[in-house]
Amino acid sequence: MKKAWNAILTILALAFLVAYSYPAFVLEVDPSTQQVLELTQWVSWLAFAIDLAFNLAKAKDRIDFLKHHPLEVLAVALPMFRPLRLLRFLSIGSVVVAKVNMARSVGITLKVAVISLFLTYIAAVQITVTERVFENGNIKTFSDGFWWAITTITTVGYGDRFPVSTGGRFIAFGLMVVGISLIGVITASVAAWFVRMMQDEN
């Protein structure tokens, strides 16, 4: 029963990701399609809220549960993080990495890289939807938004695409903070991997 419910939540997370992303790829969403998108998002939120409430109710230490299940809390509190449940598939990748005797740091680096790409995509969708309505904005399509997100999270910052609205700048601030943290983890993991290789050779 639990496996079936987890499968349902994963499918809903994927459906939410599609519904959440759709407006960024089209200039105008017709009313009927908008209703379907909103219904999909509400159904997924309700399912995640029920899942969180049920697990929280049966937990012996609720504070400890909230501390050790940040993804479940974020999925309910902040809709754009709901697709993070799809990152559970990374656990399968970790098993594969372990079986082929690859370094643990490589597995960690892979996970962080995938999370970084995922957050880049989410930021690109959100910045596109937020900025395209402003006449003086320079982010009008998803490709513009994705290019901006890539240059921001990698701290390159070419400046050819940038947010002009307050909402867009809040998104940029969040991506900058997260980007510095994640890129730092990747850099440190790769450096540690090379150091370990050199030590093994010596």
Image (cartoon, rainbow, N blue to C red):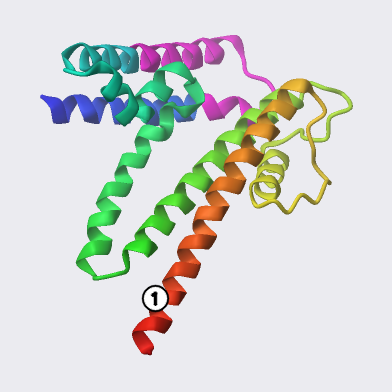
Q: Residue farthest to the right? A: 136
Between 22 and 116, the one lying in front of the other is 116
Q: Is residue 27 visible?
A: no
Query: What residue do we see at 37% from left, 63% from top?
Result: 105
Q: How many marks?
A: 1
Q: Residues within 10 Å of mark 1 (few under 14, many from 20)?
A: some
Residue 15: where, in percent of width, then height? 40, 27
From the viewer's perspective, tell me whether residue 136 is left or right of residue 190. right
- Is most of the magenta stretch helix, strand or loop? helix
Q: Quadrant of residue 202?
A: bottom left
Q: Image height check: is 161 above or below 43?
A: below
Q: Position of residue 47 (x, y in %)?
A: 31, 15
Question: In the current view of this chain or complex, which residue is farthest to the bottom?
Answer: 202
Q: Nearer the viewer, residue 96 or 177?
A: 177
Residue type, label 1: Arg
Rendered image quadrant of residue 95: bottom left
Seen in the picture, residue 16 relative to 140 is either above or below; the reply is above
Q: Is residue 159 left or right of residue 144?
A: right
Residue 158 pos. (x, y %): 80, 51
Q: Specify whether residue 144 is painted magenta.
A: no
- The residue where tag 1 is placed is 196
Residue shown at 45%/76% (left/top)?
195
The foreground one among 100 and 16 is: 100
* Quadrant that contains the N terminus: top left
The answer to whether residue 190 is seen in the rendering is: yes
Expressed as whole percent of the image width and height from the top left, the position of residue 13 reads: 38, 28
Q: Relative to 128, is 66 on the left or the right?
A: left
At mark 1, the secondary structure is helix
**Magenta stretch, residue numbers:** 20-46
Please check the rendered image and state whether residue 28 is part of the magenta-colored stretch, yes or no: yes
Q: Residue at x 50, y 54 (%)?
A: 185
Q: Residue furthest left?
A: 1
